[in-house]
Structures are given as C-alpha cells and as structure tokens.
C-alpha cells in the first residue's frame, strides 16, 4: 500500500533547511514512498528495521545493517561524515595499548599517533624568578609516536591537565626540562618532558588528555608519583 509519509517528508524538508547554510540554497521537495515493503535478512537472520522504497531503491538505516555485519558506525559532526569501521580490528588494537598509553584515531578508526606516560617524579628545583609557589613540582616523562598522521605530530603540555589529590587543577611551571617536544613525521617518536606545579602534596595525580583542547576530556589517567 502506497503512503505519503508526511512525517518523513517534513523531516526531509527540515533537514534540507538546516543543511542549506553549509551546502547551498534551500531546496524543498515532497516525495511519495512505499513504507516497510521489503523484508530484510543479513546472513540469513531477519532484520527488524524500518525501510522505504523510493524510485526503485530501498533505503535502510545505516547503523542497523552495519551493526548486523559486526561493524561499528562513527559520526563526525564537524565534517558531516558517517564511517563504518571494523569493530574487531579496532578492539584488538586497543588491547595492544599498555598502561598509561593512548592511541589517537581519525573518524574511520585509523591510528594517527600514540603516547605513553613513562613516569612522574617530584622535582626539588624551584625557579627563583617565578611568582608561582607550588607545594610540589612534577616532572612528567612521556613518549609519543607518529603512527600514520599526514601532519607532523607535536604533543606538548597544552594538551594535558593535572589534577592533584584534593581535586585542584595544576599549572605549568617554568622549570627547565631535559627533553623538549618536537614535531615528528610518520614513523618517528619523541621522548619529552613537561613540568607542572600543584598546590597540594600528592602521592598520585589525575592526568587528563585533550585531543582537542576546546572539547571534552579524551582520556583520563590516574598515575602514582615516584
């Protein structure tokens, strides 16, 4: 039975209007479709998913079919890109990641770069020219590697936040590290250090990593101080 799906059409119109600012002039179009006219199976298993038939083509939700095939669907709001990834492959790669280590990926699941926090120690040295008076100065040793990022990777302290044992945010402290971060091409790695001051003496700290410093925390670590 042929139906005019007013709700679907309204959704198409609204979506078109919203997307017009990014993709050009506004376009309004009313279409007639046949709703749930096709029975769907994946590897012999019936799929419970709404579908529509329009102009000889059946349309099915991407996520439903992808998940039935053991895939993982991703969405990049910034570029309006949907991606289908091999879930098993991504999970296996994650299992290879060790303690205090993280792999940064693009929206297709491809590994771009990784980093590992090697150790955190307390520094006795103080900068006599600084107005900052931390209770404890932390030296954080870390290593990062450019796995397959087309852009050179530069991972510095601006992508991290330190939180002490009482929940207070730490701050960059102007001591001199031995190893500075550098821009590295594909296949290269860099041993670097960053220095933070905290106002409450702590035996362990929370270290938050921000892949994008203007967005939410990407990965959080709880690390003891040696």
Image (cartoon, helix red, strand yellow):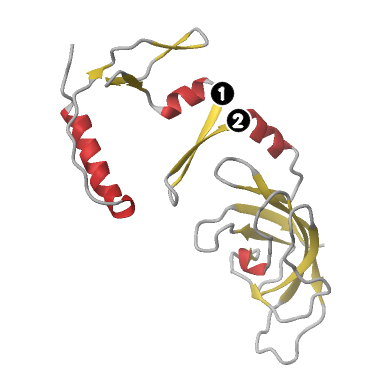
Q: Position of residue 135 (x, y in %)?
A: 70, 77
Q: Quadrant of residue 37?
A: top left
Instruction: Pick the residue in front: 102 or 43.
Output: 43
Circle 1 sits in a helix, a strand or a loop, which is it?
loop
Q: Quadrant of residue 6?
A: top left
Relative horizontal placement of residue 143, taking residue 106 as reference (left or right): right
Question: In the picture shown, does residue 43 fall above or below 223?
Answer: above
Q: Quadrant of residue 32?
A: top left
The quarter of the image holding the N terminus is top left
> Which mark is drawn over residue 86?
2
Label 1 environment density (alpha carbons within 10 Å; few <14, some 14–19, many ≥20): few
Does residue 212 show up? yes
Q: CA distance from mark 2 to mark 1?
A: 7 Å
> Which mark is drawn over residue 70?
1
Instruction: Pick the residue in front: 217 or 212.
Output: 212
CB of mark 2 within 8 Å of CB of mark 1?
yes
């Amino acid at each position: 039975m042929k139906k005019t799906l007013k709700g679907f059409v309204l959704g198409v119109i609204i979506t078109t209007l919203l997307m017009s600012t990014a993709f050009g002039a506004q376009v309004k179009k009313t279409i007639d479709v046949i709703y749930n006219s096709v029975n769907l199976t994946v590897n012999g298993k019936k799929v419970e998913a709404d579908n529509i038939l329009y102009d000889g083509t059946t349309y099915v939700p991407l996520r439903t079919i992808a998940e039935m095939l053991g895939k993982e669907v991703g969405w990049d709001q910034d570029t309006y890109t949907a991606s289908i990834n091999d879930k098993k492959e991504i999970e296996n790669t994650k299992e290879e990641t060790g303690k205090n280590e993280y792999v940064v990926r693009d929206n297709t699941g491809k590994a771009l770069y990784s980093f590992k926090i090697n150790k955190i120690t307390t520094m006795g040295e103080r900068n006599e020219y600084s107005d900052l008076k931390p209770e404890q100065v932390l030296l954080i040793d870390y290593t990062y590697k450019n796995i397959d990022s087309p852009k050179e990777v530069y991972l510095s302290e601006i992508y991290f936040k330190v939180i002490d044992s009482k929940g207070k945010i730490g701050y960059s402290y102007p001591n001199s590290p031995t190893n500075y971060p550098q821009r590295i091409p594909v296949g290269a790695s860099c041993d670097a250090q960053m220095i933070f001051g905290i106002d409450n003496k702590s035996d362990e700290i929370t270290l938050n990593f921000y892949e994008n410093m203007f967005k939410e925390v990407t990965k959080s670590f709880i690390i003891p101080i040696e």
